[in-house]
Image: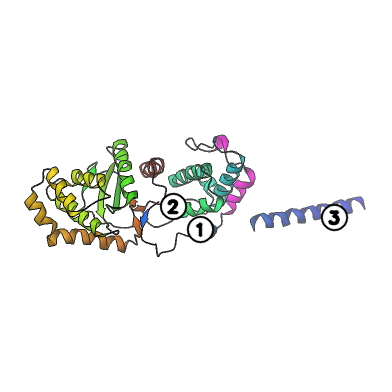
Amino acid sequence: MKNRRSRGLARSVLVIVLLIGVLVVAGACSKKASQSQATSANSAPAASSAAIADKASNPSAGGDSLPAGIDLGRLDEPKRKVFDQVVNREPSACGKGHSLLYSVKHDSSCRASFYAVRYVARLADAGFSDSEIGGKLSQRFRVPHVPYIDVSQAPSKGALAGRVTIIEFADYECKHCKESQPLMQALLAKYPNDVTLYFKHFPISSRNAINAALAAAAAQKQGKFWQFSDKIWENSEHLTPALLEGLAKENGLDFTRWFGDVGSEEIRTHVQRDQVEARSLEIHRTPAIFINGRRYTDELDLPSLKDWLDEELGR
């Protein structure tokens, strides 16, 4: 009788364990954007059983088990909780069927997951919520690359053939575009052998912005685009035709040639081609920055930009 009760109790415990197992498994210058934003983290595919097992065995997700370079030391308890929730829930940045946490620990072939987890830690430290971080992960790691941007006529500087290509679409009257210029210079100084910067015109604010784009494109024909462009940014709040003419003389351009080029069909076509391409890329605000074909979606600051470049160079 006692043995029979023991076997019955064992079967009851087994049923409870099985039921528990089932439950466990179960700032910019812009026109108003018309396209919807990238899908939120709530639409991300569910992690596989491998990820769930990893979560169960290591709910804390941190400490020495994470690779060097992912620093969680600044996260207080609430921020650490957000971090743990995201890395256990979000899928591998390489599209594999396990969580970010499992990927960064066990899949050395997926370098993108390392940068994704480091990104989550940075966003959690900055105070972003679970859902906000999920949305930013989707924008950065799950939006397809732009297959081609024409830079055949775009002025460039930096490395001749850098491993990282930055393409910036800008409007000379956009204050955020002006703020981006020293950031681009800092990146070129930080990565002199790795980064190539291209400039594309997208004047959307006023006629003065269009005139400035035409003037800079005409200066490019004389090999002085960057010098002339720098002067435009310095005077971006009052870009009158008279000021642009004065800048041409100040920069030592052949003024007669420059003046003729500004009004030429060739220069108008150059600027219009950039504008058409920007619209085809569904750009609705400036600056629009692409890093190796990926639309940059983070804050316009040096640490965020550097993080994206480090990811490209570390792949």
Q: Which residues are magenta?
A: 44-71
The residue at 12%/60% (across/down) is 264
Q: Which residue is mark 2?
A: 141
N-terminal of the pair, mark 3 or mark 1, is 3
Circles 3 and 2: CB atoms closer than 8 Å: no
User: Is residue 48 a member of the stretch shown in magenta?
Assistant: yes
The residue at 20%/49% (across/down) is 155
Q: Which amino acid is tagged 3? A: Gly
Q: Which amino acid is tagged 1? A: Ser
Q: Is 219 placed above or below 65 here?
A: below
* Residue 109 shows in this picture: no
N-terminal of the pair, mark 1 or mark 2, is 1
The residue at 61%/47% (across/down) is 55
Q: Which residue is mark 1?
A: 40
In-image side of 156 versus 123 (left or right):
left
* Residue 252 shows in this picture: yes
- Residue 253 in picture, x, y percent from top left: 10, 46
- Residue 108 in picture, x, y percent from top left: 46, 43
N-terminal of the pair, mark 3 or mark 2, is 3
- Residue 93 in picture, x, y percent from top left: 47, 50
Q: From mark 3 to mark 1, how far is it between C-alphas?
A: 48 Å
- The mark found on residue 8 in the picture is 3
Viewer-proximal residue, 137 or 287?
287
In the rendered image, the quadrant that contains the C terminus is top left
Q: Is 142 placed above or below 54 here?
A: below
Secondary structure beneath dot 1 equals loop
Q: From mark 1 to mark 2, how far is it between C-alphas?
A: 12 Å
